[in-house]
Amino acid sequence: MTQVAPAVPPLGAAPLSRNDIRTLFLAALGGALEFYDFVVFVFFALPLSELFFPKDTPAWLATMQVYGIFAAGYLARPLGGIVMAHFGDRLGRKRMFALSVFLMALPTLAIGLLPIYAQVGLLAPMLLLFLRIVQGVAIGGEVPGAWVFVAEHAPRGKVGFACASLTSGLTVGILIGSLSAAWINHHLTHDEILAWGWRLPFLLGGVFGFVAVWLRRWLSETPVFTALRERKELSRGLPLRTVFAEHRSGVVVSMLVTWMLTAAILVLILVLPNMVQKQFGISADAAFLGNSLAALCLCVGCLAYGLLVDRIGDRLALLVGAVALTIGTYLLFFDLAAGGARFLWLYPLVGFLVGAVGVVPTVMVKAFPAPVRFSGLSFGYNVAYALFGATTALVIETLAQWLGRMAPAHYVAFTALVAVVVAIWLMRKPEPES
């Protein structure tokens, strides 16, 4: 891995002022509101599958179709990530930060106002697909930009906690989505949800989005980018071209650790509530209560792993986190296979262990020098998320033909093993200064 040029301040060299602390808080809060907008879709996949496709569509096919629309958001992420990262490396992190949240708020609000299949026919799923793609473009620029933003505001020795704090903030968005799904499923009947209840979380998400737009007004540009601009050391031409020419190993590392992040978040947090209802007979109330507890523990787990990164280093923390995640995942699925008697305390434990994903952004931030950091991280992260996020459901369904209901656990464990290999490989290389 390459080092930052001497003229550029090392990552996090500037002390953290009161204004910087406020900036980090606002970045995390805005990220939470925006990430809620992106993930709430999956919590209402089942009612959406009934409303946006013909009544005579088999339930399994309608569910797969709506998950396909959900996956389209992942496929669109690289487009938004590449474009926003390019301008983020050329014009500044702050400008793209504000644009991404605005692009997320509009389609989320629009989804809550969409006509359903019974009203407009095939136009309904087509509009849903289009709005989901716009959401994907927005989140593709938001998440990598947020990690770069907070990392470049953090003091030396606190980059791990800063990145994990932002990741924890993003997972608060998952928690808000889970809580809204739990509340709606508990207080509304199935018919009420289909009639109007499903619209509530999207309308609320639109409001959240515009609140996040307002919050972003108070952000300040990162010290690292400001120094690059003052020294006229910004990337010239296409930053991504420099990434491909000089930092391919950083791209590979970013993609591989993102694979574990994708599997942990998508399988164990976003999809599991619906999965345990359909495959293991867990009630909707219990599934979403467990998910809310797991999402809360995930927020705490990210912070804990961030502290661990600053104490023992991102490489060893990645190894420890991947091994612990594997053990916890198997404990949960063995319990589910046996009837799920311990589901409501094992699931929160797994949520905490999923907090190992809080290590991933530090690994990726360190993989690229400041002039091309946004572009390099964004490309590796978004391409991997698009590839693995869009195919996870299909891969698990295929594996289930041979491995049964334990297929999701085996998949997560394999991605964790890949992360272990990456961690060991990184340990054999010198620590970058950036």
Image: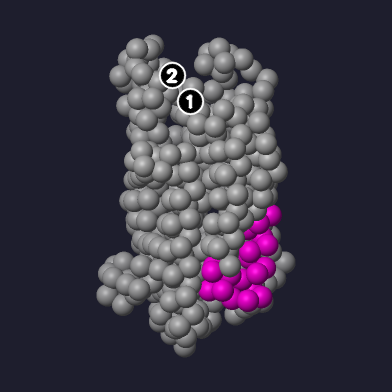
Pick whichever, 232 or 172, lies toward us. Answer: 172
Which residue is found at the position 41% from the left and 80% from the top?
1
Q: What amino acid type should be assigned to the residue bearing mark 2? A: Glu
Q: Is residue 119 left or right of residue 311?
A: left
Q: Residue furthest right?
A: 18
Q: Vertical placement of 231 versus 334: above or below?
A: below
Report the number of discs: 2
Which residue is found at the position 31% from the left and 67% from the top?
240
Q: Residue furthest front?
A: 338
SS assignment at label 1: helix
Is there CB contact under 8 Å for labels 1 and 2?
yes
SS assignment at label 2: helix
Looking at the rendering, the stretch of residues picked out in magenta corresponds to 299-319
Mark 2 nearby-residue class (10 Å; few <14, some 14–19, many ≥20): many
From the top left corner, tell me how far across and down residue 22 is, in percent: 68, 60
Find disc 2 in the rendering and name its residue. Answer: 50
Which residue is found at the position 63% from the left and 76% from the top?
312
Pick whichever, 69 or 266, lies toward us. Answer: 266
